[in-house]
Image: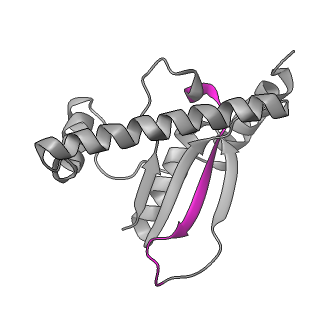
Amino acid sequence: MGALVTLDLPDDSPMLGLPWIITFGPLDDADEWEPVVCGPYERPHALALAESVVAEEQLMAVVEPLVPALSPDEIRGEIAAARIAASDEAARIEASDLYGDFDDVVDEELEAAAEAAGEPAGPRPAPAEAELRAGFARIAKLLTEKGS
């Protein structure tokens, strides 16, 4: 089984409505090959596809939003926001070391939260081709309407 990495976002996050991409790469440094980037997909489709692939193979899948920026200034703004978020995360991690290593319980907490939410254990089934194509159409509409 491989690993899936994605953002943990609140239910009202505007990023949930963005197109998402999946980057598949080696799980460890012993394996060397260029990552494969797939998408864009709607977030649920991206997560289901990534889960299906990493459930069967020793790969890392990173599912992340694709930000449709329309100018260099928008891109700079996204870079600045990412830098701020990274420094905030680094500060949170550093502060957590004062109270012990919380990484040991993160997986257990996520599994318990999924069970409490009624989500099925294991990977979600991969979406059908028709579902993906319908998602592509919605993404195309979203991208062409941005900034209008």
Report the magenta residues as a range: 16-30
**Residue 120 at least partly seen:** no
Q: Residue at x 83, y 20 (%)?
A: 145
Query: From the viewer's perspective, is 143 left or right of 57?
Result: right
Q: Relative to 66, does residue 58 appear above or below in the rendering?
A: below
Pinpoint residue 50: horizontal percent, then vertical percent: 51, 54
Instruction: For the C terminus, give its image quadrant.
Output: top right
Q: Quadrant of the N terminus?
A: bottom left
Would residue 104 appear left or right of 66 to someone viewing this image? left
Can the viewer see residue 100? yes
Give me the residue at 73% from left, 34% from top: 76
Q: Residue 134 sits in which quadrant? A: top right
Please determine whether, in this image, residue 32 is positioned above or below residue 125: below
Q: Position of residue 112 (x, y in %)?
A: 18, 39
Residue beneath the point at 45% across and 63% down: 54
The image quadrant that residue 147 belongs to is top right
Q: Position of residue 120 (x, y in %)?
A: 30, 42
Quarter assignment of residue 35: bottom right
Residue 104 in the image: state x and y as whole percent.
17, 53
Q: Is residue 65 above or below residue 31?
A: above
The residue sitting at 42% across, 69% down in the picture is 56
Q: Nearer the viewer, residue 5 or 89?
A: 89
119, 86: nearer the viewer = 86
